[in-house]
Image (spheres, rainbow, N blue to C red):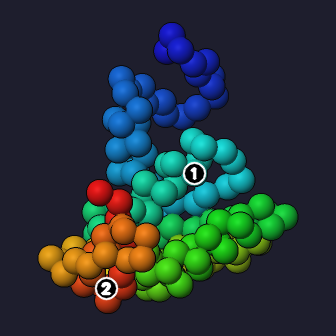
Amino acid sequence: MEKEIAHTALTQLHVVETMHERKSLMADLADAFVLLPGGFGSWEEFCEVVTWLQLGMHRKPCGILNVAAYYDALTELTSCAVAEGFLGAPHKEMVIVRDNVEQLLSQLNTAPLPSLAKWCRIENDESRNRSGNRQVATSCGSRRSARR
């Protein structure tokens, strides 16, 4: 505990060597994942567990507590990702977003275990768009630009 100050009233304290080990332990111990207002660290950790859910690495509910509309821009970004074909609508719907703690916890507690665990597979169908970037067809039926 050289880098951090430990809370003295904890019933349990897990000390790990690396950030990856910390995330793995938290994921193993968690029943669900909730994103509270925060910054890069909070966003990164939540996006990682949502990605793990999307890939089928766990089946635990994920939710965002949207206090004072803090995450409105993030929910708009996910809608844009669906519209542009970078995110499937079922994957977006895996994340429960509420602005009320009781509603979020209730919904997380009763949420069906996510069963959709599939990512788009890149196929060999390639063409070029007007700006010269190649376009790659995916099994999701969308086309996305990719720079070489």
Percent position of residue 51, x then y: 39, 62
Q: Residue at x 60, y 43 (%)?
A: 40
- Comes first in the chain, label 1 or label 2: 1
Q: Secondary structure at mark 1?
A: helix
**Can residue 96 be seen in the rendering of this structure?**
no
* Closer to us: 13 or 57: 57
Seen in the image, is 61 located left or right of residue 53? Answer: right
Percent position of residue 68, x then y: 84, 64
* Closer to us: 111 or 23: 23
Q: Residue furthest right?
A: 68
User: Residue 43 got which mark?
Assistant: 1
Percent position of residue 19, x then y: 41, 32
Q: Which residue is mark 2?
A: 140
Question: Looking at numbered disc 1 in the image, what kind of residue is underneath it?
Answer: Trp
Q: Residue furthest top?
A: 2
Question: Looking at numbered disc 2 in the image, what kind of residue is underneath it?
Answer: Cys
* Closer to us: 41 or 101: 41
Image height of 132 relative to 20, above or below: below
